[in-house]
Structure formats: C-alpha cells, structure tokens
Image (cartoon, rainbow, N blue to C red):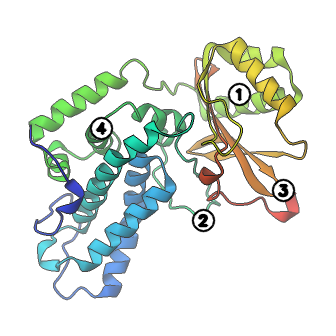
Amino acid sequence: MQNSMNPGNRTDNRVYEIGTSASVSADTSGTDRLEIFHAQRPRLFSIAYRMLGSVADAEDILQEAFIRWQQSSVKEIRSPEAFLVTIVSRLCLNHLQSARVKREEYFGQWLPEPILTAEAAASFPDPTMDDSLSMAFLVLLERLTPLERAVFLLREVFDYDYTEIARIVEQTSPNCRQILRRARQHLKHDRPRFDASPQQHEQLLHRFLEASSSGDMAALLAIISDDIVLYADGGGRANAVPNPVYGADNVVRFLLGVRKKFLPSKLIRQVMQINGKPGIVGYLEGRPYGVITISVVEGRIRNIYIVSNPEKLDRLPNLPSTSC
C-alpha cells in the first residue's frame, strides 16, 4: 500500500481532474477566483466538518485552502472542484493525524461541535442535509483511522468514484476499495439505523424535554431504550460526567440528578434543528448553555448526546432578546 505521509503539503505540482467543473482559464481574475471558491464552499465545508467534527477547525481548513487556491498557478488546474476538494481532504487528513493525540488527552468524552442547521442559521454554510451530519454518525466515525474516515466519507456520503478518491488520498483504486471495506467492517454492528421518521424523532424529543424538565421518571423510562447510552462533553470547562452512562435506570438517575443539582432555574430550552435533526438548545441569560441531541431506534431513544463545553457552543447564535 502506498504511504500518504504528508498529504496536505503536496498540492502544487499536479493537475486535478475530478468531476465536470469547468477548467480555470489563464486570465481568471482574483474576483473570479473568489466567486469560484464561494461556489464550492458549501461542499468544502461539508467535507471538512464531517471529517473533523469541528466548525472552528473546518473554517481554518477552508481558510488555508483558499490561500492555496489564490496562490496556485492556473496552468495546473483543470477542475476547481477537484483542486479544492483535494486540498481540503488532505489538510483534514493531516489535522486528524495530529488531533488524535489531543483527543486522547481531552478531559472526559469528546463529542463533535454541534451546528445549527435551520434555514435561519445564516452564520453557517448550508451543508448537505442527510443522516451523515447527525451527532450519532459523527461519533461513530471516531472509530475509524483518518484515512478510513476520508475514504468512507468521500465514497459513501459524497459519492466520488474510486479513481477520484485514489487521486485525493494518494492511494491506488484497489487500496481505496480495501480501505472502504475495512471502514464498513468497523462500523458494521453499530452504524446508526435511522428508522424514525422526522415526526417521530421530534415527538420523542418533545416528550423527553417535558419529562426531563418536570423530573418525571416514569415518563423518561417509557421513551428510552433499556440499553441507552448517554454521552456528555464538558471539556473540563462545564459540569459533565467524564464517562458514558449505560442503561435506562442509570441514565434516568443521572438526568434527574443533573436537573436537581446543576441546572440553573432560569435556563430556557428551545427545540431547534441541530446537525440536521431536532435538538434542544439551552440558553442562560440569552447565551447558549448546552445542547442535547438524540438518536432514535425502534421507536425509543437509543443515545443521548450532551455538549456543554463552552468552546463548542460559542458559534451558536444567542437567543433573541425578545425571547429572554
């Protein structure tokens, strides 16, 4: 197998030919380049965010890709999409290889940064809305190596063919097929089965919000799976359990204990579109305080994800003053 030692740094001496995007002409101006980049930006952000699970890191990757795009020679570029997707994917691979050490040292559980995906969220790019954006899917991707994650996403989510993926990750097409096969095996048993309709998902979320807010243990037990798992990410900067909580009884006791001991009385909760699905955003004095998302399997809540690390919430919009 070929070794991709430093894929993010070798983007200057190749011709990129992915897809059918128009080639860049020799007289392309700076304004034209900016327009081309902005046209590709939603796709680039979608790739980077799914690869990294972080809005801040994805934005940094896009900024670096834009600089390389501006500095590149037009004679080397036949397809802007190919060039930019390749740069972003390789930069993400480099970042993931270094980020794995940081995540191993992360205090408690690491969860992806939640993003607001409602139409009104003008602060964020408009990524492709599908189940691959969900918290459950992004958490599962953490089991893959950076290369497996890149190949899996480019093939399964963004539908690039093996020849295109091989150029991007600097592997052969047969190697990419093997990498994808391994990735599928790693995810085989626990890959989310999104069998709930959007209406059922939202109904369960509202029932969860009502039961957890009122402290109704019976109502909570009625809507969660016996083998439910709760994950919480406070990053050492907010109250959060450092390890997953397993089982219905333990999860309910945890939720009721948090409600009694830690939740501010003035907390305002709103149901909003988070990572493509209904989620709960808690606000304190108009600022995001925490985000809760769920996954639903066979009509019950199978996983609960709580993000309270303020660093992962500061890009969410504040609550309008009229609602406080």
Up the image or down, 305 lies above or below 316; here it is above
The label shown at residue 152 is: 4
Residue at the disc numbered 2: 122
Residue 310 falls left or right of residue 88? right
Which residue lies at the image location 72% right of the left edge and 12% below the top edge? 249
Q: Earlier in the sequence, mark 2 or mark 1?
A: 2
Asked if labels 1 and 4 touch by Cβ distance under 8 angstroms, the answer is no
Callout 2: helix, strand or loop?
loop
Left/right of residue 83 with respect to residue 114 in the rendered view: left
Quarter of the C terminus within the rendering: bottom right
Q: CA distance from mark 4 to mark 2?
A: 29 Å
Please say if the residues under marks 3 and 1 sit with CB atoms less than 8 Å apart. Answer: no
| Residue 85 visible in the snapshot | yes
Q: Which quadrant of the structure image shows residue 225?
A: top right
User: Which amino acid, mark 1?
Assistant: Leu
Which residue is depicted at the point 24% across and 26% down? 182
SS assignment at label 4 = helix
Q: Which of label 2 and label 3 is nearer to you?
A: 3
